[in-house]
Image: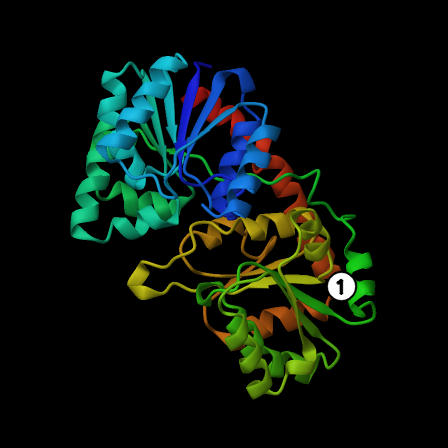
Amino acid sequence: MDKTLIVTNDFPPRPGGIQAFLHNMALRLDPGQIVVYASTWKRSPEGIAATAAFDAEQPFIVVRDRTTMLLPTPRVTRRATQLLRIHGCTSVWFGAAAPLALMAPALRRAGARRLVATTHGHEAGWAQLPAARQLLGRIGETTDTITYLGEYTRSRIAAVLTPEAADRMVQLPPGVDEKTFHPDSGGDLIRARLGLSDRPVVVCVSRLVPRKGQDTLILAMPAILERVPDAVLLIVGGGPYRKELEQLAVRTGVAGSVHFTGPVPWDELPAHCGAGDVFAMPCRTRRGGLDVEGLGIVFLEASATGLPVVAGDSGGAPDAVLDGETGWVVRGGSAQETADRIVTLLRDPELRQRMGERGRAWVEEKWRWDLLAERLKALL
């Protein structure tokens, strides 16, 4: 692999799924062949200290820009080209195509021979906006490859590219660490800690925002409790929607059967996922398609943990489920469909086991980080 400059706003310690995606990929490349150019997470003393500590632990070079948001401005472009030349990089990986890959022509002129731009959910939103659509088209013409998460994002982004650029698209989704997410991840200990050992548990692990569908789960709880009276909904994660969700649980009369953990440490996420009998996140598309699920790696992490999944039909979420095999896809926002699928699973241990085992096998076959990192190496 040629020496690679990774240009990104999405890198730890800034939290998030894209950040975890890029970091996991970077860790699986040759550390001597990687230089990361990233924005600063927070400019507070605590944020700067956390970033410095994180960067010092990495096996590759991390260069932080002073800004908290890299944009393809003349200054940032000059810095990127300087880093390319100083470190002798001949390939560039843009961690998010929009808007950073607009720097591609300048980096090509500076000596980059391979330019790869990765897309996520927000580029599919860009494809619906006239001005942003033109910028995506320009990125397609000036990079060697645009990667996509799944069929949903591919179809929308390809529609605004030239046929030649669309033909050069390659799937590169996030992977799952199957050694971290596995059926013996410690779920029983979490259930015991929370006093849920003897109750059927529906778990949702995600940031608390409207798109993810935790509100739909709460609205589904009356129908679930009617048929499985001791069921409990375990909502794992933090976010700005928590207060509204707690109020909704009270108004719906199910507050006693909904447990909020708040944010949990990263190393406890597999155990919290494994604390469920069923994983459910009935995500939905909002804002006319601008707020959409790019893939939904949490469904695959749940499958790796051995759980059947119930997923909403937002964006690329169905790409992370073998419908009828590893779980089911429901209409995002439909409390009734969500309740029906969850009840079916809670009442049928053999079905849960069969779907969980199929999900685990699928992750091992297709979604392991090492397999996907080899694909990225070939592109670079």
Q: Which residue is mark 1?
A: 349
Circle 1 SS class: helix
- Residue 27 is left or right of residue 117, and the answer is right
Q: Taking 264 as reference, is 198 above or below it?
A: below
Residue 271, position as x, y percentages in the image: 73, 53
Residue ID at (39%, 34%): 65
**Relative to the observer, which residue lies in front, 275 or 265?**
265
Q: In the picture, which quadrant includes the C terminus?
A: top left
Residue 278, position as x, y percentages in the image: 67, 62
- Residue 300 is left or right of residue 159, and the answer is right
- Residue 120 is left or right of residue 102, and the answer is right
Residue 83, position as x, y percentages in the image: 37, 20
- Camera sees residue 201: yes
Q: Residues within 10 Å of mark 1 (few under 14, many from 20)?
A: few
Residue ID at (34%, 43%): 154
Q: Taking 357 as reference, is 100 above or below it?
A: above
- Camera sees residue 30: no
Residue 319, position as x, y percentages in the image: 47, 49
Give amino acid for label 1.
Pro
Residue ID at (71%, 68%): 201
* Residue 5 placement: quadrant: top left
